[in-house]
Every structure is written in C-alpha cells, then in structure tokens.
Image: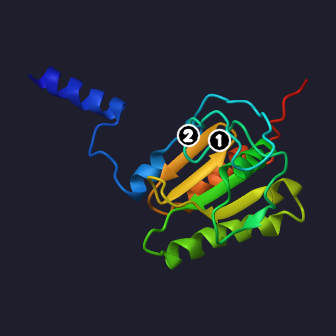
Amino acid sequence: MMRRLVALIVLSGLLGAGPAPTGAEQKAVLPANAPLGKEFPDLGNIHIKRLGDPHAPYNSDPPTSGPHMPGIAPWGAYDKPIPKEYQVHNLEDGGVVIQYNCPKDCPDLVKKLEGVFFKYKARADKEKKYMHLILAPYPDMDARIALTAWTRLDKFNDFDEARIDRFIEAYIGIDHHSKK
C-alpha cells in the first residue's frame, strides 16, 4: 500500500498533476511554438478583373488565399469592411488583417484593437514590414475578432493582445507571390 502511494506521488509529480489551469494561467502555459491560427489549403493567387466577377469560393471566412483583385487595399485602419477580393491580395503581399464583428457596437474593443494597430504602425518607420497591417470591421462572421494571414486564420471572442502580437509577429511581411 505504501509503495503504491509513493509511486502515485512520484508519478503525479512527473506528470504535473494538479488542478487544470484556467483563465490567465492557461495563457501562461501555451507553448511559444503552439500553432497560430488554423491553417487552410492554399487556393492560389489568380487575379480577377472586377469586384463581383465570379470566382471559386474561398475556403475560410474571412478568406486567407484565393482569387483576388490585381491591386491591394491601402494599408491602414478602416471603419467600413474591405471587400474580400482586396483583403486576399493584401495577405499575399505579406499583410495581416485584424477584423472585428460588432453587431451592437463595441467601442471598447475597437479602441483596444486600434491600440494594437497603432503600436505596429509606429514601428513601421524602422521596420517596413509593420506597414503591412489592416484593421477593419467584418460583419457577419461567427467571432468578434479574426486575424488573417496567407492561409492562416485565428478567430476568438475576447481581446487578447498577446495572442494578436504573436500572430502579427509570426506572419507579417512574408511575401506569398508564386516564384515562377
């Protein structure tokens, strides 16, 4: 009986038994190399001529690759949604798009997201890759916040600056044009 108890104590120490972490504790135990968002298959980078032209459907919402306009949306913060076909070209050019869904208005969330956006914009003078950032509303998505990069999407409901920072740092400035 005593051997079994000692073995159980040793085993639980090795396995890190104890109460499961919750809330802020859970964020602290997220490994630094944990995947950042869900990866979607690359749908290519075919250009369409005009908004509204028929094209293959996107495999994520918001989109992360696929048919898009030949030009990009100017990098910046918007108060109106950006057409998907422009977003995708921005992602191809190494951009990260931060989008939010506020059906009943959420000025506090928008203010926090703007703080993150302007933090990176301030760094763009020294590191040009940080200019490749967009903040815009995206109505009708199934989360309050979405981060997109080429073939990557992370959606969540509660503001988490560390999570946003990790996503931006991982994907901003990486060009995804086909090397032919």
Q: Which residue is mark 2?
A: 60
Rendered image: mark on residue 18: none
Instruction: Determine whether the residue tagged by mark 1 lies in a helix, strand or loop.
Output: loop
Assign the C terminus to one quadrant of the image.
top right
Can you give x and y, in whole percent of width and height, for residue 44 in the image?
A: 73, 30
Can you give x and y, in whole percent of width and height, for residue 164 in the image?
A: 60, 56
Assign the N terminus to one quadrant of the image.
top left
Classed neighbour count for the residue bearing mark 2: other residues with Cα under 10 Å, few (<14), some (14–19), many (≥20): some
Which of the pair 127/29 is nearer the observer? 127
Residue reaching furthest to the bottom: 107
Can you give x and y, in whole percent of width and height, for residue 57 in the image?
A: 60, 36
Which of the pair 48/124 is nearer the observer? 48
Q: Amino acid at mark 1?
A: Thr
Asked if the residue under mark 2 is in contact with the one under mark 1, i.e. CB atoms within 8 Å, the reply is yes
Rendered position, 120 above or below 11: below
Which of the pair 2/122 is nearer the observer? 122
Give the side of residue 148 with respect to residue 104, left or right: right
Rendered position, 87 above or below 41: below
Which of the pair 130/104 is nearer the observer? 104
Q: What residue is shown at x 59% (from left), y 59% (from top)? A: 99
Q: What residue is shown at x 71% (from left), y 68% (from top)? A: 77
Instruction: Determine whether the residue tagged by mark 2 lies in a helix, strand or loop.
Output: loop
Q: What residue is shown at x 50% (from left), y 50% (from top)? A: 155
Can you give x and y, in whole percent of width and height, for residue 151 in the image?
A: 65, 36
Give the side of residue 128 with respect to residue 48, left or right: right
Q: Which residue is mark 1?
A: 64
